[in-house]
């Protein structure tokens, strides 16, 4: 049955637009007005033609206005203009004739640049964003400065030449306003550069790293303040977006463990479910978040759920896909992940470069969630606590490494391949982190264990012999390590105690109740975090984990008759 479902995925994940129909069948547009949207097939086709694209393809002229080189030229021209004014007024009045014509040349340049902006600027969007007043003021001050230049040609009849205050006021007010306009263009360009291939929301004066995955589900980047707000989503704009478009009918879920921002403007509608970057969430956290978010979405058709981490990609994609699985009972993990990748990526990006969930462990946890999404959340959380079945781990082994130990240790510390390392740093360390749900505190708890590798003799060669860790309990050295819940394995090619900030060589997450009865888990390079994209590591590299399997698994466990299935239409509760 599972294979039959997988066959419904399009044979080619390229999913390019249908040239004959001139419609991309994988895009579901944002609800516009009273128009309803629903899914008609596995290809995410809408029931009506696309009428409200989030953004149109940008022209070369629009890109130019936001380019660093263009605005840098403008800033340099303004600096030269200001320098010529100071030279004339205070330093070398004898050079007045030369600098006068140079300044007239700069005036002509600024007039031409102003006309260029007048022609290509998207005035409705700029009006909505409140930028038009700066453009108008810039034009007025430019022509006022030119009028001052003309007035100098008639010193006997016009007194402006002797009025230093008027001259400086006009000149430098114009410089400040034009710098502000350049700043607006630079920040737009910087945000698009940092946003990369992600689809942006550009409507009603907004230009945000924000995407409607579905009409009631949003994925976005981190709301930022201070300097970071220059190249990420400005917090004030995110506040304005939700409080004008979805007033008091939204919940924002912050997945950043490492970042925070002022939440006052959101009126208490921000929820914190933080976990580490480039990692999946503990399964209990995913259960609680999806239950809360899907319940809020079902409560009212106008309710909106917005998910964000730092970049709005990995962690956001995991949680968004999980919510999609909760809302659509006939969907499966790959379909939900594919939907996120297609909707989050700009239209003109190749399929191979789409923005999606890449981490193997993150994708594995979406598959875990697919198996338990219909179960009663309370019963699931109880099983994810310390009351759940325990798994006894025995040994972790690495094979087919095919690179030297020195190379891996240097790479872990961010050093060049030929750098020399202190011998005391060399070694292999396994860090095992166990996460489980505490029923009393209603939050995730964590405990970490550290093990050293078993290396045999002076002739040991990791390329030939591999690396092996004997996993035993700390409390009783002779027994195996018995754990329940989420387990994170991190392998370091160095002594972590000597360098705590070192990066792991490879890592992966599993949940004890999803381990098979075979007692052995084999993960290939493509199944392991950190190394799955490392071209230096051989494709035959693999990790083998041996364990005593738990007494039961999710597939075999009977949790009564309590199953809270949701319809493919989240509002169909019949």
Image: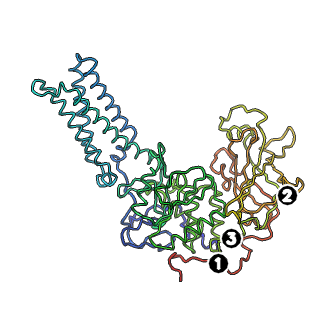
Q: At numbered mark 3, what does the secondary structure look like: helix, strand or loop? A: helix
Tell me where residue 379 appears, x and y as whole percent.
69, 73
Question: How far across and how far down the image is residue 375, in percent?
Answer: 65, 74
Q: Which residue is mark 2?
A: 480
Instruction: Please rate how many residues cluster around mark 3, counting C-alpha atoms within 10 Å: few if below 14, some from 14 to 19, many from 20.
Output: many
Disc 1, SS: loop
For the residues labelled 2 and 3, the Cα–Cα distance comes to 26 Å
Q: CA distance from mark 3 to mark 1?
A: 11 Å
Kindly give the residue lying farthest to the bottom in the view shown: 574
Q: Give the answer, above or below, for where 534 lies relative to 264.
A: above
Q: How many marks?
A: 3
Callout 2: 10 Å neighbours few (<14), some, many (20+)? Answer: many
User: Taking 230 as reference, is 331 above or below it?
Assistant: below
| Quadrant of the image occupied by residue 462 | top right
Q: In the depicted view, which residue is nearer to us: 56 or 525? A: 56
Q: Is residue 61 left or right of residue 318?
A: left
Q: Are marks 3 and 1 in contact (CB under 8 Å)?
A: no
Q: Name the N-terminal-most of marks 1 and 2.
A: 2
- Mark 2, mark 3: which one is toward the viewer? 3
Determine crowd level at label 1: few under 14, some 14-19, many 20+ residues with C-alpha closer than 10 A. Answer: some
Residue assigned mark 3: 380
Residue 24 appears left or right of 516: left
Badge 3 or badge 1: first in the primary sequence:
3
In primary-sequence order, the first of circles 2 and 3 is 3
Where does the image place residue 561, in percent across and percent down from the top left?
68, 81
Q: Which residue in the rendered view is the most extreme toward the top? A: 94
Q: Residue at x 34, y 50 (%)?
A: 59
Residue holding disc 1 = 563
**Position of 483 compared to 283: left or right?**
right
Q: Quadrant of the N terminus?
A: bottom right
Question: Label 1 vs label 2: CA separation?
Answer: 35 Å
């Amino acid at each position: 049955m599972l294979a039959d479902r997988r066959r419904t995925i399009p044979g080619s994940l390229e999913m390019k637009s249908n040239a004959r129909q001139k419609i991309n069948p994988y895009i579901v547009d944002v609800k516009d007005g009273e128009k309803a949207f629903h899914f008609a097939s596995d290809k995410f086709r809408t029931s009506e033609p696309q009428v409200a694209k989030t953004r149109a393809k940008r022209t070369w002229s629009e890109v130019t206005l936001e380019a660093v080189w263009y605005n840098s030229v403008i800033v340099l021209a303004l600096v030269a203009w200001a320098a010529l004014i100071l030279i004339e007024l205070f330093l070398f009045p004898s050079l007045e004739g030369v600098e006068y014509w140079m300044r007239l040349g700069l005036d002509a340049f600024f007039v031409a640049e102003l006309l260029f902006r007048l022609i290509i600027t998207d005035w409705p969007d700029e009006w909505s964003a409140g930028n038009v007043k700066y453009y108008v003021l810039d034009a007025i001050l430019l022509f006022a400065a030119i009028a001052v230049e003309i007035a100098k040609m008639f010193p006997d009849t016009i007194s402006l030449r002797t009025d230093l205050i008027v001259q400086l006021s006009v000149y430098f007010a114009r410089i400040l306003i034009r710098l502000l306009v350049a700043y607006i263009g630079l920040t737009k360009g910087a945000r698009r550069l940092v946003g990369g291939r992600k689809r942006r929301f550009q409507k009603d004066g907004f230009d945000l790293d924000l995407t409607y995955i579905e009409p009631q589900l949003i994925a976005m980047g981190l709301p930022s303040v201070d300097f970071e707000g220059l190249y990420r989503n400005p917090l004030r704009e995110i506040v304005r977006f939700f409080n004008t478009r979805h007033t008091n009918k939204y919940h924002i879920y912050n997945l950043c463990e490492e970042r925070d921002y002022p939440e006052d403007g959101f009126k208490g509608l921000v929820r914190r479910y933080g976990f580490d970057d480039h990692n999946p969430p503990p399964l209990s956290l995913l259960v609680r978040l999806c239950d809360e978010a899907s319940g809020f979405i079902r409560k009212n058709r106008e309710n909106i759920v917005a998910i964000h981490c730092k970049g709005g990609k990995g962690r956001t994609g995991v949680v968004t896909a999980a919510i999609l699985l909760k809302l659509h009972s006939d969907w499966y993990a790959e379909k939900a992940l594919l939907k996120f990748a297609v909707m989050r990526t700009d239209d003109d990006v190749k399929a191979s470069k789409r923005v999606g969930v890449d981490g193997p462990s993150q994708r594995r946890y979406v598959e875990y969630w697919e198996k338990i999404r219909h179960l009663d959340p309370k019963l699931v959380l109880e099983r994810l606590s310390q009351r759940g079945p325990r798994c006894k781990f025995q040994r972790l082994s690495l094979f087919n490494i095919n690179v030297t130990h020195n190379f891996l240790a240097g790479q872990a510390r961010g050093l060049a391949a030929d750098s020399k390392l202190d011998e005391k740093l060399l070694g292999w360390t396994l860090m095992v982190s166990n996460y489980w749900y505490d029923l009393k505190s209603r939050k995730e708890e964590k405990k970490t264990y550290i093990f050293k590798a078993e290396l045999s003799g002076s002739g040991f060669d990791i390329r030939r012999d591999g690396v092996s860790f004997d996993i035993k309990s700390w409390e009783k050295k002779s027994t195996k390590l018995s754990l329940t819940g989420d387990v994170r394995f991190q392998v370091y090619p160095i002594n972590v105690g000597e360098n705590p900030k070192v990066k792991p060589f490879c890592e992966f997450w599993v949940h004890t109740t999803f381990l098979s009865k075979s007692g052995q888990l084999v993960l290939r390079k493509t199944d392991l975090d950190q190394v799955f994209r490392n071209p230096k590591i051989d494709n035959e590299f693999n990790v083998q984990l041996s364990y005593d399997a738990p007494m039961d698994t999710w597939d075999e466990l009977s949790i009564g008759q309590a199953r809270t299935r949701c319809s493919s239409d989240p509002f169909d509760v019949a």
